[in-house]
Image: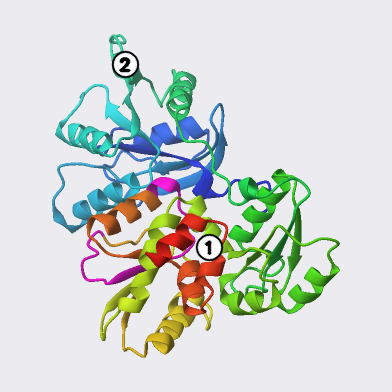
Amino acid sequence: MSLNETPSGNRLHIGFFGRRNAGKSSLVNAVTGQDLAVVSEVKGTTTDPVQKAMELLPLGPVLIIDTPGFDDDSGPLGEKRVERTRRILRKTDVAVLVVDAAVGLTGPDEELLGLFKARGLNYLVVYNKSDLLPGLPMEEPGTIYVSAATKDRIWELKEKLAALAVGQEPEPKIVGDLIAPSDFVVLVMPIDKAAPKGRLILPQQQTIRDILEAGGAPVVVRETELRDALDGLVRPPRLVITDSQVFDLAAGATPPEVPLTSFSILFARYKGFLDQAVRGVRALDRLAERDRVLIAEGCTHHRQCEDIGTVKLPRWIRERSGLDLDFVFTAGGDFPEDLSPYRLVIHCGACMLNEREMKHRQRAALGQKVPFTNYGLAIAHLRGVLKRSLGLWPSLVAELKS
């Protein structure tokens, strides 16, 4: 991925929902101008969510999601379609309810509207197949009549979607609000074996871009060159940001007066759960024999033999605690609704998940009183540098002492 591409986790997520054969897939294809989704006269053709990151004028970078039909369904396949639709709602920013204009709103449509409202989503009701009507009815607020077949009023639909997106929260900063123009920021980046050859992993790319946009000067080194890089700077850096896996090496090489944190901790802040993650990390000291720990990742990358989530973290926690613990691993969209079996959730930096999905996971843990932290904070705690890694936020350091 190049530095000027917008990651999926930072794009506006637009989900198309509705009953089978309402024309969702045809409408998605009409809106995107691409044959993104399979179209068929057979009901229920879409059994898995289909998504595409793209530029959609006049909205800009978006992630379009075509969902399976949401019906009064029975049987395992129907239940699977409905469950996947509910899961997509967790990360949807703007919801589009697609209704067959000749049929009108049905029970499943009303149920979807209830789910949109319960989640506080901005939504639009789109009556598709308007070309089959003798005339266009009067549109109520929050509705529009279109035809995916004839492309009638597709542009007006895009304009309405753009208006719904206006109220979205402004994009937060990863580190740009913590530095001033011309500040040096040293980034400690071991060569990640999980990244394709010649490429950096996404959090590193995004952090470099954020520093450049703030007018800062990123200095990128491996952990083996950190000390020489610091000695070679004409003035101390404003900040050192390290990969969590080499926290102890970075802490040893960085002068105590220079703030030190990690990419993962910055991403916990960027995704809005740093406070909760700091409170949750103390649960590492309260684990007991045979406790179950959930380790969750937002992406589904190819795992290496020394994978951080499935190998290193469990090993470090067992070594520190001396306990025989039960670790459970999830990746991508697979995050359990029932967290009661777990004594702790440790999440990745969530660079591939959008804000809504992360807020859902946070609320699930908070509501079920399960401590929730992330990789960076857990590793900092295990390595004995937790307070130092939070030095940029004195109130969080004070909370550790409470």
Q: Which quadrant holds the N terminus?
A: bottom right
Q: Disc 2 residue type?
A: Pro
Q: Quadrant of residue 213?
A: top right
Q: Tell me where residue 127 appears, x and y as whole percent.
A: 31, 23
| Spatial separation of the CA atoms under disc 2 and disc 1 | 47 Å
Please check the rendered image and state whether residue 291 is part of the magenta-colored stretch, yes or no.
no
The amino acid type found where label 1 is placed reads: Leu
Image vertical order of residue 400 relative to residue 112, above or below:
below
Q: Is residue 295 at least partly visible in the picture?
A: no
Q: Position of residue 298 (x, y in %)?
A: 44, 61
Question: Magenta region: which residues?
Answer: 337-357
Crowding at dot 2, Cα within 10 Å, few <14 / some 14-19 / many 20+, comes out as: few
The answer to whether residue 356 shows anywhere in this view is yes
- The residue located at (55%, 66%) in the rendering is 389
The image position of residue 237, as x and y in percent, is: 74, 60
* Picture mark count: 2
Q: Tell me the residue that label 2 is attached to.
A: 141
| 286 over 206 or under it: above or below | below
The quarter of the image holding the C terminus is bottom left
Q: Secondary structure at mark 2?
A: loop
Q: Is residue 237 left or right of residue 321?
A: right
Q: Residue at x 17, y 30 (%)?
A: 106
Q: Position of residue 362 (x, y in %)?
A: 34, 55
What residue is shown with label 1? 390
Task: Inspect the magenta stretch and tell me whether residue 346 lies in it.
Answer: yes
Main secondary structure type of the part rendered in magenta? loop
Residue 166 sits above or below residue 287 on the image: above
Q: Earlier in the sequence, mark 2 or mark 1?
A: 2
Q: Kindly identify the residue that appears in the image at 81 percent across and 75 percent down.
A: 228
Q: Nearer the viewer, residue 371 or 137?
A: 371
